[in-house]
Image (cartoon, coloured by chain):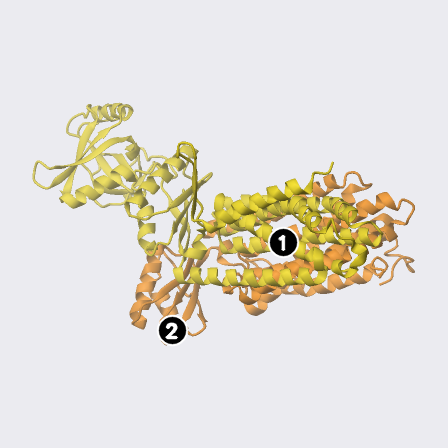
Chain colours: A orange, B yellow
Amino acid sequence: MNIIKNRYLYFLISFLVIIPGLVFMGIHWSQNPAEGVLPLGIDFTGGSLLEVQFADGTQPEATVVAEIYNNLSDADNEISAPIVQLLGTDAISVKSKAMSDAKKGEIIAALTEKTGTQVTVLNFTSVSPAVGQEVARAAAGAVGMAAIAILIYIWFAFRSVQHAIRYGTAAILAMLHDVLVVVGVEAILGVTLGWEADSLFLTAVLTVIGFSVHDTIVVFDRIRENLGIYRKVEFEKVVNHSIMQTLDRSINTQLTVMFTLFAMVLFGGDSIRHFVIILLVGVFSGTYSSIFNAAPILVVWENKEWNNWFRKSPAGETA
Amino acid sequence: MKRRPITMLVFILVLVAVSIWINLSESIQITNPFNSTTLYARNVAIQLGLDLRGGLQALLEVPEGVAVTAEDLNTTKTILENRVNALGVSEVTMQVAPPRRIVAEFPGVNNPEQIVASVKQTGLLEFVDMGDTRLPDGTTILTDQGAPGTATPADDTTTPMEERVWPTVLTGTALQTVGVQPGTTGGYEIAFSLKPESSQIFADYTSKNVGKILAIVLDKKIISAPSINSPITEGSGVITGDYTAQSANEFAVQLRYGSLPVPIEIAESRTVGPTLGAESVRKSVLAGIIGLTVVVLFMLLHYRLPGLVADLALLTYALFSLALFKLIPVVLTLPGIAGFILSIGMAVDANILIFERMKEELRSGKNLRQAIDLGWQRAWPSIRDSNLSTLITCVILYIFGSSFGASMVKGFSVTLALGVLVSLFTAINVTRTYLHTLMDNITSIDHPKWFGL
């Protein structure tokens, strides 16, 4: 199998996967310019989320709940026009502006009165908008910091190889590929299913970054080793050989991680399903990008192929 | 260069035994056999995070614009701890997140409204110079303490009353003792004494301002606005009002424990009901067991004999990790469990890397013993480098998680990082030792299928 020979085909596949995500990011942005490219959860925007469970058969209508919120809204705690969602047949989830715990108490009391039965708070979160914005800024900072730290680390780890910086850069490009895939999937699911990015989503993205680089390094390590062995062989062949040698390992590791993640998607409960699905997509993308993007980028760079990209009849181009 | 595998094996088995002991115990204790004193004792019960056992987490924040020192924050934390302990809430943890936040966690509480209300009562007591202005009790005023702005000059009469900023003479931190005593005209009053350095300020001020009004203000509300009848030089005084024994007592408690050096706000509040938490534990444990079983079977079927070794190494890894979690202790959160399950994947990866290399060496005609050592040596740089990059992201996640009380993110990074460290240890020591122990006497040529060749 010659992966390097078809490298432009694999780059094309990556673009085809990323483009729909970008389109949906654009759609969301045009609809909500303030939020940016992703529907954001209250962790980042501020606001409150209340999930309440009712005794069987007493789940109130969404309009009833909204009315309670509107009635209790005042100047200190503006919570009118909440977004009410029915969860199954016995629970609701209500999103509104940030509110105090005292106000939440009033709402629970009103709901209890309305339904005439005991109601149980499953989950209540309230985040002030200022904290939300700060978290969002720090999140962007964390991703940036991780990228820089990894670039420096790989540069250092591959210092014995010629052009060590290329390995770091290629790993970062593959990592950006995975981040784009994951954010794109989140944007698609956000626009279509109403998923919101929260701090767990950020955790998933950073984990994907870690995993992606982990995978890339295994392939690069093999290249590093083989360059020492096959000194007379063309760079392209050494890279392809290294990919093939690590392919079994890449697939098997990928499989074991995916087994555990699948188990969590199927049996792990609702609260982390979103998180695990994003991880699953990211882990798959991470393995793909290590094999089909990171290593081929080294070859493109070695041959300085961009010199041929815009010529009339390119010699090195296949796709 | 080579250690005898048997020494390593004994060492590993001892660690395994200790881990099993810790994993099966709620608390551990080591007694000195000679004089039966306790050498070491520790509670090793699994600590569940708020998302798993239910409870309240609040992010408390000193509002923007208020100057705050690290000491202020620590004092605030201590006072708040006293206050919630007085409410009978146990196992409260409060952590200072500089520069202006405190993360407070109240596991298992079922009355979050009450707790938040008590925490929010800043109890900022001030003695405010009102000049000749007498405002009715209960009026909310602005002061130059703990809020932006400077005091409005006393001769400025153009500023409307509600926009005036009054100068604060002293705050509640100046109080030395607070007590309740029967009042001279029936009812009760609150007697206080001031710390020596504050007494002087108080004496100077009252000497210069006889006849003026000095308001006692709690949380920016005037509770009493007496005139200064004579200079108070002895550093003590009384607050009179319409107090019963009980209300006087409550007020005194608030003054004693309640004088926070800075005002605070609730920036974030999260409550998880106990039902949701219990369900999450059950589901994630089930998911973990199913996931692990599939991985164990896959390794066994795909790698045969080495797969069995990997499964044993994996079991060892799980025992070590769990024991470490209980010993440190690591507070387990839902994402924390996810981090742990993910780190299992990384631990398996180390084994896979070694086995794939081993297979290559076997194919090239090495004998089994050489293949094990060479396979391990060749795989090591990639195991080391790849895991280090995961550790780097863990550190960044941890820093991010700590500064916002995002205990979910923090929990995830801690368990993933520990998992990676333990998996490095098992990859270096355990897998290789097990391989040697089980295989040094086998010649692979007889049974290539055992190795998945």
Q: Position of residue B290 (x, y in %)?
A: 57, 64
- The answer to whether residue B152 is left or right of residue B361 is left
Q: Which residue is mark 2?
A: A59
Crowdedness near tag 2: few (<14), some (14–19) or many (≥20) residues, C-alpha within 10 Å: many
Crowdedness near tag 1: few (<14), some (14–19) or many (≥20) residues, C-alpha within 10 Å: some
Q: Which residue is mark 1?
A: B312
- The answer to whether residue B389 is left or right of residue A7 is left
| Residue B156 quadrant | top left
Q: Which chain does tag 1 point to?
A: B
Residue A124 visible? The answer is yes
- Circles 2 and 1, Cβ within 8 Å, touching? The answer is no
Q: Nearer the viewer, residue B225 or B379?
A: B379
Q: Nearer the viewer, residue B262 or A289?
A: A289
Looking at the figure, which quarter contains the N terminus of chain A?
bottom right
Secondary structure category for the residue under label 1? helix
Q: Position of residue B120 (x, y in %)?
A: 33, 47
Looking at the figure, which quarter contains the C terminus of chain A?
bottom right
